[in-house]
Image: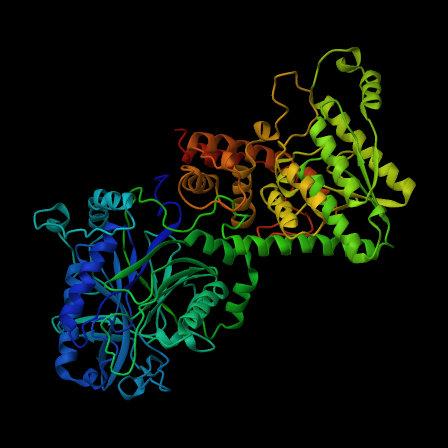
Amino acid sequence: MEFRSVYDQGFARIAAVTAPVAPANPAKNAQTTIDLLHEAQAQGVAVAVFPELNLTGYAIDDLFLQEVLLEQTLAAIESVRQASAELTVMAVVGAPLRQGNRLYNCALAIQGGRVYAVAPKTFLPNYREFYEKRHFASGASAATTSITLPGVGDGPTRDDAVAASLAASQHDAVAASAATPATPTANPVASPDSPAASAPTPANPANPANPSGAVVPFGNKLLLDFPHIPGMVLHMEVCEDLWVPVAPSAQAALAGANVLVNLSGSPITVGRADDRELLARSASLRCNAAYVYAAAGEGESSTDLSWDGQTMIYELGEKLAETERFPQGPRMAVADVDIRTLASERLRQGSFDDNRIEQQGAASDYRTISVPLVPTRADIGLRRPLDRFPFVPDDPARLAQDCYEAYSIQVAGLEQRLRAIGNPKLVIGVSGGLDSTHALIVAARAMDRLGRPRSDIIAITMPGFATTAGTKRNAIDLATRLGCTFEEIDIRPVATQMLKDMGHPFGRGEEVYDVTFENVQAGLRTDFLFRIANERGGIVLGTGDLSELALGWCTFGVGDQMAHYGVNAGIPKTLIQHLIRWVVAEKIFDDAVGATLLSVLDTEISPELVPSKDGEPIQSTQAKIGPYPLQDFTLFQVLRRGARPSRIAFLAEKAWHDASTGHWPVGIPENEQVAYQLPEIRKWLELFIKRFFANQFKRSTLPNGPKVVAGGTLSPRGDWRMPSDASGAAWLSELERNVPKE
């Protein structure tokens, strides 16, 4: 496996292309198509999708029925086929094709010197500005399973060895293009004396040469499989096919397709672009697929219509790429579709396969055609949006919406729990850190909504041997400014006595700060909270977050792992600061509370259990268990995607290697906008795996609390179930084998 190859990491580079068309000039359109295929090749693209009828133009009306046009269309297909022999990229082009006494609006898949499949349009619009039934027949009415293309060679495709040689010959050009991906560079056809061009091309016994023309699989139930891009299965549909209640692509998805491509004419009217986006987005989400859309643009006849050349690529409801509308000149939306994640989503969503079984008739009778496309294994970068913080959206509006929903989920969950058990008081330990601060403002809001006084919240700060003046001040200020019942319990005398009684060196005056020293403090705090809850008629509100649970960064049993209800258990650490900042911005509480919350945000993340000497930094959580941004990145990939360690490392390097590139969520301080290189990523990933497996027992007894983020939860009653004695050896081995140390 090439660690930095997008194809080896489970991606496939797809392009949605729009280009100026010359109406009724197939030869010129073929040349345009060929030129753009070279550009796609230079960018490492596996499949390039063109608009509907791009070899002729869409708006040519009765010229579709002219012999000259149909003959020239076949010649154009032959030109594209011949050019494809020197390329690895597969072209999906549109053309009118005659079959018997009918004419069909078709999508053709061409790669490596062969036309592999022809898919006729199924649903023909014949309303408002559309009159397709005047010229074309529906693919549903086709009685044959193959089509003969007179004058088009069936030119034997290259065998795997030759294809691999060709792919290898493209590495330099592809790598050069990857350095400047925004400006596609044409990749010249291999010279006649190049190894790829001079190599023999043995005939394909499954499709021998036919002097009357290529005989090609034909129908709207064709799937294209790519043995050298494991897991990718492609289906072609044409324009209106997407606009019907049950699209051919939906049935194809149930039959196994996960890359759904649409060649579209689609003239533009006000508002139609939004409709297209909605359809493509929803299709990708409902079908657990990528949806690739390419519409006709510049050059189409403007007799009665106009065209905008919209292109877009969606995956699981998220937009990966698009080009501007109404362009001058060709445009190409390029994105790396995550084939491996699509497979993972379908595997996890059992209802998808249940639907396939229920729709057995609709999803049957598909034919699968193998395309021996061998993509480049060079490092061509990663062409798709990739969040450094997968739990925190980069878009400010979406982040604000997520914060509103997350906070509201927490508040609503706590409200319901309090109502269900007789509205007890809340007992919470407050340290002045992020987690307890956020839990406290959730509790305060819940009390407000329940019409109860905030004095029913008993907020207790319990300074230990390493508590700093700043965090203690923040804890006091926040509790009192919110109007909670505030108390302070100094746990140091009890902790010292306990350590002395058990014979710990600290009890004898020695500076021994081991795990026992730390856990005595954590345990005492929890013990006090539970006993005070007993005495005051309350419940203990847990403050631990999702990231801490993943890493086992909590004291089990009589410790911060335990509570009566945990409002933060579904919130990752990297989201909490944004939630607090959102609460301040929304002025949910008064300005004095807001000032304290902002002060908390400026505080170093620390358990404050081990004292530091003058001039030394305080105990740092992230120095011990790794940077939370990296560990939350890993957590998302493990919990939501089920990704292997090498893939996580690959994605993390792409996301974090350069702090100056990409987007940062609003509110991330400049000093925290840092980069991580592969050795550091690998180090902390290894630690994550070890701690994740070693600490499952803490999650197996997790208190109740609401699921918040779509990335998942670690509740044994929710998203995550695993035995506490499971071994992480296989994951560590995969990391060792496949992730470079440098």
Viewer-closest of 444 and 421: 444
Residue 597 in picture, x, y percent from top left:
67, 41
> In the figure, 358 relative to 162: above or below?
below
State which quadrant residue 437 falls in: top right
Residue 624 in picture, x, y percent from top left:
59, 27
State which quadrant residue 337 falls in: bottom left
- Name which residue lies at 25% across and 79% down: 302
Label count reads: 0
Colouring: rainbow
Viewer-closest of 378 and 454: 454
- Name which residue lies at 47% across and 41% down: 648
Residue 153 visible in the snapshot? no
Viewer-closest of 582 and 18: 582
Residue 458 in picture, x, y percent from top left:
83, 42
Residue 179 visible in the snapshot? yes
> In the figure, 231 relative to 608: above or below?
below
Residue extending furthest right?
Answer: 535
State which quadrant residue 216 falls in: bottom left
Quarter of the picture holding the C terminus:
top left
> In the figure, 68 relative to 201: above or below?
below
Viewer-closest of 444 and 473: 473
